[in-house]
Amino acid sequence: MSSEEMTQKEIEYKVESAKLQLQSDILATKVSKAEAEAELEAAKHAYPLDAQMIINCQWEVESYADGLNRLESLMTELF
């Protein structure tokens, strides 16, 4: 194998590795978002009602949703 072929293989490996890392980040964010959504639903049904907890949970869900959108946009843009 020539050094040019080795370099090409190394580049392909690094690109695939970066893609897999981004997929892993997307999956982890989806899991965290689902957990935050479950926590939000639990907070909405808790007694006594804790409005600040509900708001904090809403912010968390919104943050994960925003992060997920950004990660998915990156995936589309880069790969």
Image (spheres, rainbow, N blue to C red):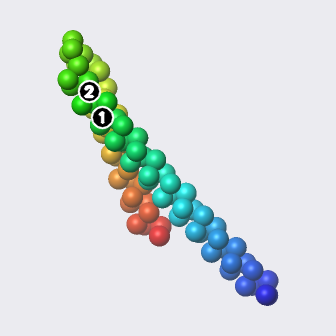
User: Which residue is at 47% across, 67% downward?
Assistant: 78
Residue 33 falls left or right of residue 49: right
Q: What residue type is labelled 1?
A: Ala
Pointers 2 and 1 in contact (CB under 8 A)?
A: yes
Horizontal and vertical percent for residue 70? 39, 53
Which x, y percent locates residue 16?
A: 58, 68
Residue furthest out toward the bottom: 2
- Tag 2 secondary structure: helix
| Camera sees residue 63 | no
Residue at position x 46%, y 47% in the image: 28
Question: Residue at the location (44% across, 53% down)?
Answer: 26
* Distance in Å between CA atoms under marks 2 and 1: 6 Å
Counting other residues with Cα less than 10 Å from the Cα at mark 2, is it few (<14), some (14-19), or many (20 or more)?
A: few
Judging from the image, what secondary structure is the residue with disc 1 in? helix
On screen, residue 46 above or below 2: above
Q: Which residue is denoted by mark 2 in the rendering?
A: 42
| Image location of residue 53, percent across then percent down | 29, 21
Report the side of 12 relative to 34 (left or right): right
Relative to 71, 54 lies left or right: left
Query: At label 2, which amino acid type do we have?
Result: Ala
Occupied quadrant, residue 31: top left
Q: Residue 38 carries which label?
A: 1
- Looking at the rendered image, the quarter that the N terminus falls into is bottom right
Residue in front for this viewpoint, 11 or 24 = 24
